[in-house]
Image (spheres, rainbow, N blue to C red):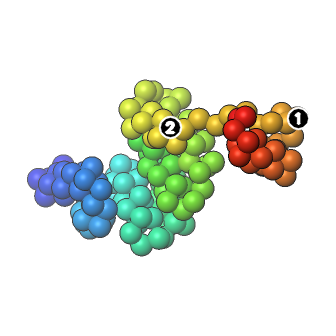
Amino acid sequence: MSDSLEALLSKGDHALKRGDTLVAMVQFEMAHAIDPKPAVKAKLAYCLARERKQYQQAMTLCREALEAEPDNPDHYYQLSRVYLVAGHKNKAIKSLRKGLKFRRHQPIIDELNRLGYRRPPIFTALPRDHVLNRAAGVLFAKLGSR
């Protein structure tokens, strides 16, 4: 790995940790042009989703990273972040859980804790998103008995 590529990745990672996805996106785009590694694709995907709202392209990049390295939990973490930005919370949770099966990854654990736990549905014989479960859940939450 060349020094310029290492510098780009380092700057991108630091910007991503600070929450500055625009700077991180620029760094990861340049790094991707030099060497399109799976880790770069996954991080670039999150930045694209966050900054440019290019959800389909971001999901495609994450899937490419997962095809190259299917046992890397960080790729599942980045995919879940793309799903969250796109508004697909259920898919994000599934992605996080799938990534956690490979090995303990602290960012995944932190994200799952941040998203919280869901109570079981009121009517367990019905799907969670069934009208009765949703209405009963809202009603019981307002009454304070749930």
The amino acid type found where label 2 is placed reads Leu
In the image, residue 68 above or below residue 54: above
Numbered disc 2: secondary structure: helix
Label 2 crowd (10 A; few <14 / some 14-19 / many >=20): some
**Residue carrying label 2:** 112
Q: Nearer the viewer, residue 67 or 125?
A: 125
Query: Which residue is outermost to the front?
Result: 143
Q: Residue furthest left?
A: 3
Splitting the image into 4 quarters, where does residue 52 fall?
bottom left
Q: Is residue 13 above or below residue 20?
A: above
Residue at point 50%, 32% (across, down): 100
Q: Amino acid at mark 1?
A: Ala
The answer to whether residue 122 shows anywhere in this view is yes
Look at the picture and state if 104 lies above or below 146. Answer: above
Q: Secondary structure at mark 1?
A: loop
Q: Which residue is mark 1?
A: 125
Q: Residue at x 27, y 61 (%)?
A: 20
Residue at 57%, 59% in the rendered image: 87
On-image quarter of the C terminus: top right
Does residue 14 appear to the left or right of 60 in the view shown?
left
The spot of residue 106 in percent (x, y) is 38, 32
Instruction: Locate residue 87 relative to residue 24 in the image: left or right.
Output: right
Dot 1 or dot 2: first in sequence order is 2
* 23 to the left or right of 95: left
